[in-house]
Every structure is written in structure tokens, then in C-alpha cells.
Amino acid sequence: MATKRHASDNIVGHGDLTKRVGVEQIRARGVDVEKLIDLLIDAAGAEFTTYYYYTILRMYLAGNEDYKEICEDARLEDRAHFELITPRIYELGGSIPKDIREFADRAGCPDAYLPDDPTPTNILTVLLEAERCAIRTWSEICDLTLGKDPRTYDMASRILQEEIEHEAWFIELLSKERDGVVRPSGHFRRGTPGEAPYSKNLGFYNP
Amino acid sequence: MPTFPPLNVATDPKTYRVTFILPDGSETCLEVGEDERLYAAACRAGLNLPCLCLQGWCITCAARVEGEGAWDQSLSLRYFPQDREAGFILLCTARPRSDLRIRTHQRVALRDYRISRKLPTPRG
């Protein structure tokens, strides 16, 4: 059983560099900071591996240039998410694993492997389920931080909005490709590939 | 890569009695078809269990089988023989092959178990 923290544990002394007010304030508001860091690292691992695997999936959409471009948007935006999450992990006192293998192993969502039979339908199915896992992940992080940790919540909310758009894209494409049914995403195009209108708009650190 | 059947299959000719034991000690017993995933069956009965990837990877839905039991976990994208040896089951992708008694909400237990055996696992 964990020892209950005393309220004074949240006080950061004058000139004390071992604690961060930015961390202790959210802890005092009820955030389990260590759990949040672990969730963010798992999520960053998932965004990073997704970026990697989408690179391959994109290649096998050859001949379906519309699918390829949309996959490219999602791929680049997932990379932007990784770039957005990582600074927050370090701000909170965490760090990503030294070994990339460990990082990939702890990803919170499955590896988006190229299907054995890489038809557009099968690839779009992998893409769709990857986005759905991301939506559930970021919804959970929004729930954990709402009203307690505005900085992480703002970040998670921006990422979530893009993941929801990605899901809508892949539903539209898979529905037409597999079932011949039109289910519009409601979207048309990004201004530039991987524009990431939410996660790159006024990002606190996203080169 | 496994091919996922539809989530809800209610017409299976063969069914098993599956009891879900929740953290508050309450039990819910269901008839589950051999092709129905346990998580889907729990949802059908109104149980609100944790889940995330629904592909047998993230361990959010992890549970533990009490006593003897058989289940098919072949739909899972990452499930280790050691998980099975210790009785852990991933409800999102598991299908019954016998009557089962299952204690839900075992994500932390499975995470710690995998870490102790140096197996890959999400940490959060």
C-alpha cells in the first residue's frame, strides 16, 4: 500500500531545483503524475511506431494516389504528435527510454503492420483501427487531466481532434473501397501534407 | 495477422457459461458463444469494462481466469505463453472454449507480471 503523501510534500522550497511547481501544482489537484508520465510515454511510443509503420503502408497504396496522400497526412501528423508529447514528458520530470526497442515495446497501441495481403481494403483497415486506438488513448488522457492539468489537457485535446479527423478519413475511404457505401468524413484536404492544424497551431514546442 | 470476425455474434450453436467477477465482488454470469469475444459479450450484458486497443495488445482489458478454463486468444496481436500460464486473459480478443470464471480489472497485475519477466508491455 502506497504511503499517503503529506500536503507539505507539494511545497517547493526557495531555490529548490529538485522539484517543479508546474508538477506539484497538478499533483496537488489530484493528478497521479507518475501514472500520467507513463501514459504519455506509452502514447508517444504509439505515435512514433505509427509514424514508422504508416511510412510502409503508404508505399503499398501505390496506384491509389488519393489514399496515399491521406495516409501521408495522417503519417506526418502522428509524427507531429510525437514531437508535441515528448517535451511535455520531460517537463513533467519523465524521459523517453534510452533504447528505441524499449520505446516501441511499450507503445500503447499495436504495431500497424503491413497486412500479409496488402490490398487497399486491408491497409485501410489497419489504418482505421490504429486511429481508433489513438482516439481511445487521448480520450483517456483528456479525462485524467481535465480541470487539473490544463497544459497536458490542451495538448491531448489537440491531438485527439486530429485523431478523430483521421478516423473519419479512413471510414470514408474504407467504406467506399470495401462496401461501395458513401460515408463522408466532412473534410476535404489539408493545406499542406501533414499540416496538423491543431497540434502545430501555437504548439508550445514543435519545430 | 488475424482476421477479426464481427464483434457481436449471437447465433453461435455452442455456448459456454462465463462468470465475470468485478472489483466490488459482484458477479455476472453470461452465456457466451464460442465465436463471440468475451469483451463484446460483457458489453452486451451492460458491463462497463476498461478497453483501449480492442486488438489484444494494450492489456487495458486484462483479466484473470480463476481455476481451470480454456480460451482461444489467437485474435490477439500480442499475447505471450507466459500470460496464459499465469491465467491472464485479454477479454477484447478472447473467445471461450470452456466455462470460465474471470476476475476483471487486472491490467496492473499483468503489467507488473510482464515487467517481472522482462516481457514487452505498456506501462501506463
Image (spheres, helix red, strand yellow):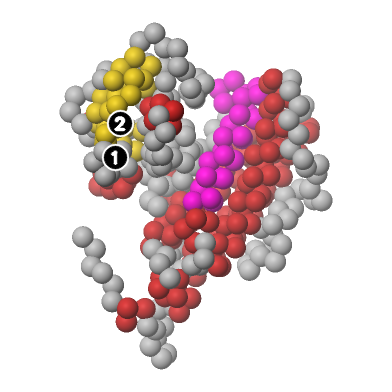
Look at the image and tell me in which quarter the N terminus of chain A lies: bottom left
Question: Numbered disc 2: what chain?
Answer: B
| Disc 2 and disc 1 in contact, CB within 8 angstroms | yes
> In x, y percent, where is residue A10?
36, 78
Look at the image and tell me in which quarter the C terminus of chain A lies: bottom right
Gap between marks 2 and 1, in whole Å? Answer: 8 Å
Instruction: Name the residue type under label 1.
Output: Leu
Q: Say above or below: A82 vs A183.
A: below
Question: Numbered disc 1: what chain?
Answer: B
Which residue is located at x 63 percent, y 67 percent? A205
Which residue is located at x 34 percent, y 20 percent? B31
Callout 2 secondary element: strand
Earlier in the chain: of badge 2 and badge 1, it is 1
Q: Is residue A127 magenta?
A: yes
Please report the bounds of the magenta region as a residue range: A115-140
Single out the residue that lies furthest toward the top. Answer: B13
Single out the residue that lies furthest toward the left. Answer: B67
Res. B22 mark: 1
Labels 2 and 1 positioned on one and the same chain: yes
- Residue of label 2: B28
Left or right: A163 in relation to B44: right
